[in-house]
């Protein structure tokens, strides 16, 4: 089942449940008991619950969006840094330059073709990717500079490799869901309470009121789904992609 189909079903289910409860409540209690005015205190409490829950939802959406943006920045920084390692290797003799670029290509190909799927399944980066990056670092670090130009380029290349490693570790930390379970408990409980307070307003089964109640519950379901979708930066429908690697390494024929 696709995530969009799941969203549609969730929104329809939330809407149907609210409408069904209103209709059943109206039939059971009787129309004569649903026409009275709602006490002011209930309206005030309902309004405050809605405001508080709206703030919580806004903070949750901002948090997962910020986490996704940080993950995207880490991927771009990783791709940019590894690409600069390949470019700066031009100062080395042809045989060693080709060796460094082969290490870079092997790492990039593995990240795009293998490790991305591994992160989605396991929620962490793989040991094989770490080994490939360590091999690149060892090849550069263990070769003594043979000229003044190589000496000047040695430290910048090592710095770029360190940046790749740092961005890679950040990518690993962002893999998998990022929102604590207690936050999800608060969001779901708040949704139940907020939607449940609709019935304290003595909603009748007029088409206008039923439509508004259904749309409100569907909106809550959509916002919760959006938070869930953004919560895993690498594993869901709007996840961070490998496009930075694809754009910077066109010769590898990678697919984003």
Image (spheres, rainbow, N blue to C red):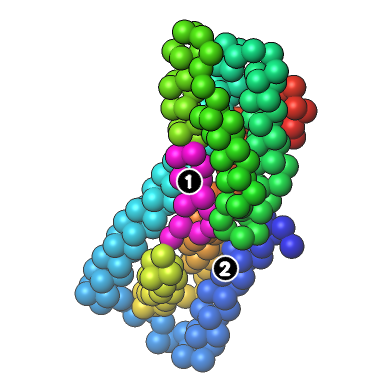
Q: Is residue 87 above or below residue 246?
A: above
| Residue at 53% across, 74% down | 18
Q: Could you say where residue 42 lies in the image, as x and y percent from the top left?
A: 27, 75
User: Which quadrant of the figure has residue 2?
Assistant: bottom right
User: Which quadrant of the figure has residue 99?
Assistant: top right
Q: Could you say where residue 13 lies in the image, as x and y percent from the top left?
A: 61, 70
Is the magenta region chiefly helix, strand or loop? helix
Q: Could you say where residue 72 lies in the image, as x and y percent from the top left?
A: 51, 38
Span colored in magenta: 165-179
Furthest-bottom residue in this view: 28
Checking the image for residue 169, the label placed there is 1
Q: CA distance from mark 1 to mark 2?
A: 42 Å
Q: Is residue 243 above or below residue 251?
A: below
Residue where numbered disc 2 is placed: 15
For marks 1 and 2, the one nearer the N-term is 2
The residue carrying pointer 2 sits among few (fewer than 14), some (14 to 19) or many (20 or more) residues within 10 Å by Cα, namely many
User: Which quadrant of the figure has residue 152?
Assistant: top left
The answer to which of 109 and 233 lies nearer the viewer is 109
């Amino acid at each position: 089942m696709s995530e969009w189909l799941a969203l549609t079903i969730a929104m329809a289910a939330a809407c149907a449940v609210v409408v069904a409860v209103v209709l059943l409540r109206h039939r059971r209690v009787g129309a004569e008991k649903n026409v009275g005015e709602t006490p002011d205190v209930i309206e005030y409490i309902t309004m405050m619950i809605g405001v508080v829950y709206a703030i919580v939802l806004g903070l949750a959406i901002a948090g997962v969006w910020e986490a996704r943006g940080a993950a995207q920045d880490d991927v771009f920084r990783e791709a940019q840094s590894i690409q600069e390692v390949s470019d700066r290797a031009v100062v080395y003799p042809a045989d060693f330059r080709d060796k460094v670029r082969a290490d870079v290509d092997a790492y990039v190909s593995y990240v795009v073709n293998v490790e991305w799927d591994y992160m989605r399944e396991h929620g962490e980066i793989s040991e094989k990717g770490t080994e490939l990056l360590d091999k690149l670092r060892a090849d550069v670090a263990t070769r003594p500079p043979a000229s003044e130009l190589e000496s000047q380029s040695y430290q910048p290349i090592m710095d770029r490799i360190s940046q790749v490693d740092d961005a890679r570790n950040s990518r690993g930390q962002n893999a998998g869901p990022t929102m604590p379970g207690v936050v999800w408990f608060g969001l779901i409980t708040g949704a139940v309470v907020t939607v449940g307070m609709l019935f304290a307003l003595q909603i009748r089964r007029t088409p206008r009121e039923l439509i508004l109640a259904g749309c409100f519950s569907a909106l809550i379901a959509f916002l919760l789904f959006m938070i869930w979708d953004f919560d895993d930066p690498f594993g869901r429908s709007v996840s961070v992609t490998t496009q930075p690697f694809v754009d910077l390494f066109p010769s590898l024929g990678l697919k984003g």
